[in-house]
Image (cartoon, grey):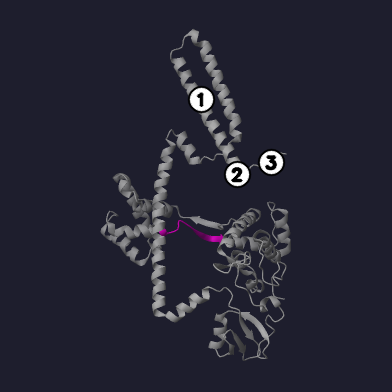
Amino acid sequence: MQPARSKEEAAKLDDADREAMEKKIDESLETLTQIQVTLMNYESADEHVLQQRLERLVRGFADMHILKDQLNVNVPEEVLAYIKDGRNPNDFTSQFMERLASENQFTNGKISALTNFKQEYEAMIRDSFPDEANERIARAKAVYENCTVLDISGNLLFRTGRKRLDWYLSRDLATVVDDSTIQLKFANRGTGRSNEPFYLQDMRNACVVCGKTDGLTMHHVVPHQYRQYMSTDIKSRSSFDLLPVCLQCHDQYERHATLFKKHLEKCFQAPLEGRGWVERRDIGQAGRAAGALLGQHADKIPEERRIELRRTVQAVAEARASLFSDSTRQCIEAWQREQLDLSSNAHRGVLRELCSIEARVPGPDYCTHGEIVVGAVNQAQSGCAMCDECRALVGGGVPALVLAWRRHFVHNARPAHLPQYWVAEYPCAQQ
């Protein structure tokens, strides 16, 4: 048995195979040129030379046929189409880069606008509500606030956050015991979480995977895209499957979670982007035209092509005026009344808004990936494409889906700092 190759060794072998193929192609092209020269000046004495060159060409093709199975090179179909049409494949790269630059410029503009809006909004909040803003910043550092709610007899009822404490106090339903504890003034129904130790403990503000205490996010062990379609008795337990994870560990685990979602996508025939999209091709075509007119190299577009792009944008904008904002719609109506075109810079706002309109939208029968998966599990629908594990998951219902995600998190993230009493097999619905 041969030892496994490292990535570096594999990359070197791939480069060597590619160079060998390129060398064989060059040699074959040279041989073809020699054959062409021989045929142009062919005499009977050249028959032996021609035979040798043909044999050399055949051997070259045979060597390339062997080498092709050792190559790991992906060529876009568009490039092959360019070559088939007799066009230079470099033209494809050039046009692709120009289109990418145009789209990137528009995207960067949106990011810049949102960033500026965020900064201005935060500044206005700080100026108008300085105390509340500072308190909000201080709270953002802690995932768990570990506030305590006692029943009318003084027994521990459950743990919660500051917001819920304020809710009880603002309605005069509780009295303050200390800064993080209140006692209810009324006799509550039931026992709350008093018989569930997990919900009564102080939770540590640290990553459950590595133990870090900064840069924490709340991780949904059972992704929201599935849980939102589960029954209320299961959704009421969502806090059990919310765990603090640092950004780095979160990013590392999400790569595994994405692979599991793709596995569910295949077994349940549930596209991750959902099923039932409607393509608005005219919007897509006009959006690309508007992007080209707004692009960094718009001034290099031939005038004839620029006029064609403007006509495309104007026709779609007038036909789809209801999709635009009020101010933009007024501008479009002015075109129709005064028979204007898009040559004026005053209409660049229309182009920008057209670029932001989605060409692909959910149709009347649209279903999300999570809705399809949870629906199939609820109705015990198994398909021929399912693996044995997913068949078992369908047989176990929604609790089996919850358990599968919990075990997936434990197996792939390998959390070393889970809260006490947290186990994958914990009931997913309140008893």
For the C terminus, the image quarter is bottom right
Distance from Cα at disc 2 to Cα at disc 3:
13 Å
What residue sits 70% from the left and 82% below the top? 194
Please tell me whether mark 1 sits on a helix, a strand or a loop: helix
Crowdedness near tag 1: few (<14), some (14–19) or many (≥20) residues, C-alpha within 10 Å: some
What residue sits 29% from the left and 61% below the top? 334
Distance from Cα at disc 2 to Cα at disc 1:
30 Å
Please tell me whether mark 3 sits on a helix, a strand or a loop: loop
Question: What kind of residue is marked 2?
Answer: Lys
Q: How far from the left and from the top, in percent, is residue 329? A: 34, 63
| Foreground of the two, 322 or 411 | 411
What residue sits 54% from the left and 22% below the top? 57
Image-quadrant location for residue 166: bottom right
Q: How far from the left and from the top, in percent, is residue 42? A: 46, 12
Crowdedness near tag 2: few (<14), some (14–19) or many (≥20) residues, C-alpha within 10 Å: few
Question: Could you tell me if residue 362 is visible in this image?
Answer: yes
Give the magenta-colored segment's residue range: 356-366
Question: What kind of residue is marked 3?
Answer: Pro
- Nearer to us of marks 3 and 1 is 3
Please give the residue where the numbered disc 3 appears in the rendered image: 3
